[in-house]
Image: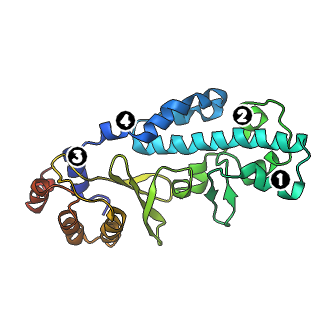
Amino acid sequence: MSDFKLFKFLSVKIPKNNSIALSRDREFYSTNSYYFSNYPSLKHFMIIPDGLSLFKSIIILKSIMNFEEMKKRTSICYLVNFPEENRREEITKNLPYMVDSSGKKRYVLFLSEEMEEKIYANYFEDEVGEGDYGNQFIDPFRIFGNRPFTSFLSPLIVLYKEEFTNTIAFYHIDSETIYVIDDQACLEAFIPLFDKFSPEVSKTHIIAKLIELMKAYFNNDKDTFISLLGKDHLISTSLYEKVLLGEYDKL
C-alpha cells in the first residue's frame, strides 16, 4: 500500500516542513549538534534533508551523549573504587537505551556490543570525543534496521509492526505525521495528518485510532483506511470530501 497515491496527495495538501523545523526534536538537534565536532566519523548524520534524517541524527546524538556520560561515570567508579558487581548499573543509571534482538540493553548504538563492553572496563582521564573508538564505529541503522527507532533514544512512537516484513509504523507527535519505516531503516510511507482546516478535536485517544488506521494500511485495505481518515477526524471534512471524490488519482 506504500505506493497509494493518496499519501502523495496528503503530503501536498498537508505540508509539514514548518512543523518539523519548529519541533522540539529540531530544537534538541540545534542545541546539541556541537557534540558532532568531536566525532568526525559520525558527521554524516548532520546532513538532514528530511524528518527521517532528523530522527536518525537525534538517535546518534543521544548515543554520543550516553557515551560521554558513561565514560565520565566509569572513571569516577574507578577513582572511588565502586563495587564491581554494581558498576554497570551505576554507569548506565537513567540513560536511554535500545533493546537488541537478544534482549540486551544497548546505550551507544554506533558501537558494536564488544566495543560497548569495553567502556565498563576502561578508565578515561578527561577524554572527550571518539578517541581510539572512531575507526570501529558501526552504522546502527545498517546493523539494526528500524529497531533504533523503537528505542528510548528515538522521538517516535511505535504504532504497529507488520511481523512478516518487520516494517513498523511510527507517529511523530510534533509534526502529527505517520512514518512507515522498513527493516532496512528506509522510509516506506509518509502520511501527514490534521490539515489547517481540521477541527479542534480531542487527541486523547489518538494513538488507538492511529493503530487501527495502520492495521488497515498493512492489510492493504484502502477503503477502510480512507473511511477512518474521515470517521476519526484525522483530516478536515473538506479534504476528506476531495479524497472521496478520488482527487488523489489525478496527481
Residue at mark 4 to residue at mark 2: CA–CA distance: 29 Å
Residue at mark 2 to residue at mark 3: CA–CA distance: 41 Å
Q: Earlier in the sequence, mark 2 or mark 3?
A: 3
Specify the quadrant of the image occupied by residue 228: bottom left
Specify the quadrant of the image occupied by residue 19: top left
Residue at mark 3 to residue at mark 1: CA–CA distance: 50 Å
Q: What residue is pinned by disc 3?
A: 14
Q: Residues within 10 Å of mark 2 (few under 14, many from 20)?
A: some
Q: What residue is pinned by disc 4?
A: 21
Give x and y (percent) for residue 18.
Answer: 31, 36
Give x and y (percent) for residue 185.
Answer: 49, 53
Q: Is residue 41 left or right of residue 152?
A: right
Inspect the image, locate mark 4, and give the three-letter code of the amino acid beneath it. Ala
Q: Residues within 10 Å of mark 3 (few under 14, many from 20)?
A: some
Inspect the image, locate mark 3, and give the three-letter code of the amino acid beneath it. Ile
Quadrant assignment for the N terminus: bottom left
Residue at mark 2 to residue at mark 1: CA–CA distance: 22 Å
Q: What residue is pinned by disc 1?
A: 87
Q: How is the image coloured?
A: rainbow
Residue at 20%, 56% (x, y): give it.
235
Indicate the secondary structure of the residue bearing disc 1.
helix
**Taking 109 as reference, is 240 above or below it?**
below
Q: Earlier in the sequence, mark 4 or mark 2?
A: 4
